[in-house]
Image (cartoon, rainbow, N blue to C red):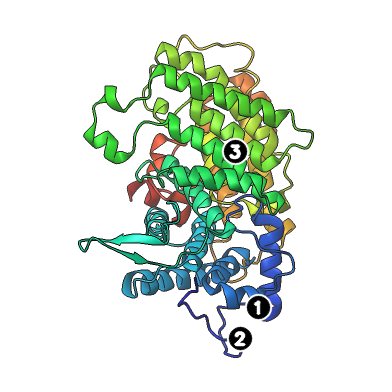
Amino acid sequence: MGSSYKPVSSGSIDTDEPSLVEAEEYLLNFQTYKSKYFPFIYIPASTSAQQLRQERPFLWLGIMTVGSKSTSQQQRLGSRIRQTIAQEMVVQSAKNVDLLLGLLAFIGWANYQVHSKPFLAVFAQLAIALVFDLGLNKFVPKDTQVMPCMNQKYSKPTAPRTMEERRAVLACFLITSIISSFLQKIDSLRWTPHMDECLQMLDDRKECVNDETLVKQVRLQLIVEKMAPGTSHDRAMESTEQREPTSLYLGDLHTQLQSVKTSLLAESHSNEVVLLHLYSAELEATLSPTFLHPNQLTFQQRQSLNIGLDSIKSWFSVFLTITPAAYIGFPFSIFSQLIRCLMTLYRLTTLDDQNRDESGIWKAAHPLQILNGVINNMEQVAILAGLDNRDSSEGDIFSQLAQMFRSLRPGWEARLRPDDLVLSNSPTSQNVNEISLPDSLGAEFFDNDWLMYPLPWEQISNC
């Protein structure tokens, strides 16, 4: 399946597109740092950027966008992706695998589009629409089919499902499920029996190490998806009793998750990508985002607090051991996990709940130490990874996050106990008043495509 998208020819002058040398560098950047975190595509090391451009031009554009180290170039190429999607999908009604793969690259690393208007929810739905249009979520039809309304059989040549298509549909489920959980306003791609087959076949016929990572990520996310209440449509149509999973069903899913966790931790070579997803899934399964809303917790929620806090500590124990230079590979999923863990950690350690445990695990959480570690690492990314912010007044996403997180410190310090503050060695920024931010990461954080908005943060909360 080809693409009707035609990038500017290599002989033309276009300041937005990378040169031939830069294109090879961006592709290598993607293969080295990024693809392992969200392995929606397998590109053999022998594939050149020029070859990829000829075979998958829109995917090439997506990879150039996320592989560039220039913040301004990322934004310009991101604008071209938006324009291309509008022209190809809306005006031309095009549908092909190249468009889907390019979309997955773009929304997979949507966190790089820090100066753009929100697009994540819409583009996630466009990716799902492409999956449906291409029939990637269904079994390949047989050669002989019945023509609707004519009751006549006809022969239609069909091609077997490719591994590229299987990865694409599984990755679409993975990223849209994560986006759905984070934004709490769209539905993910629905799981189908054919996707079960795709998952099993990818597990059986791995073509690269990243295939194993994708299989594990999808299996973990599938458990999280099953634990959640129904889709937004279900929530509108069903009563609470109908839409909530039963205790027995949830118990079985928790057992599955624990079994997966035991298996992963027993492996001799732990995969940091999978471990981050594991602990995030464990947190999602233990403490849903809705628990952050009420001031008083139920008995069952209190029982889950220690488990959730342990999951957060385990997540950060992995995250903070990753060298800051490698942070440029983090996709939207890791950023959403980071925000979720920080928000939940703050909420847990400042609960006005008389029945919470004041010993042991709570005092060992050290939220300010964790916040300082995140800030310190984020501040190093631009220099260590060689990011180019010369044409961007706002800077890269990592520098902006460091600035935002540092501005949270006064609010955290005001709420935490004195013994927590003793453990904090990092000085408070002298410029915290330059950005007016809320004192905590509130639950409304999930209601906006916050990573795609420019500072100040008030614009995020009000959109």
- The amino acid type found where label 2 is placed reads Ser
* Label 3 to label 2: alpha-carbon separation: 39 Å
Disc number lying in front (1 or 3): 1
Q: Is residue 394 above or below residue 175?
A: below
Q: Is residue 429 visible?
A: no
Residue 147 x %, y %: 27, 63
Contact, CB < 8 Å: mark 1 with mark 2?
yes
**What amino acid is at disc 3?**
His
Relative depth, front residue between 348 and 41: 41
- Tally the marks: 3
Within 10 Å of disc 3 (Cα), the crowding (few <14, some 14-19, many 20+) is many
Residue at the image point whose x is 56% and y is 38% from the top: 219
Residue 192 lies, in percent from the top left, at 43, 43
**Residue at the limit of the structure toward the top, as seen here:** 355
Camera-nearest label, 1 or 2 = 1
N-terminal of the pair, mark 1 or mark 2, is 2
Residue that label 2 marks = 10
- 427 over 454 or under it: above or below: above
Q: Secondary structure at mark 3?
A: helix
Question: What amino acid is labelled 1 in the image?
Answer: Gln
Query: Residue 50 bears which disc, if any?
Result: 1
At x 52% / y 71%, what residue is drawn? 58
**Tag 3 residue:** 277
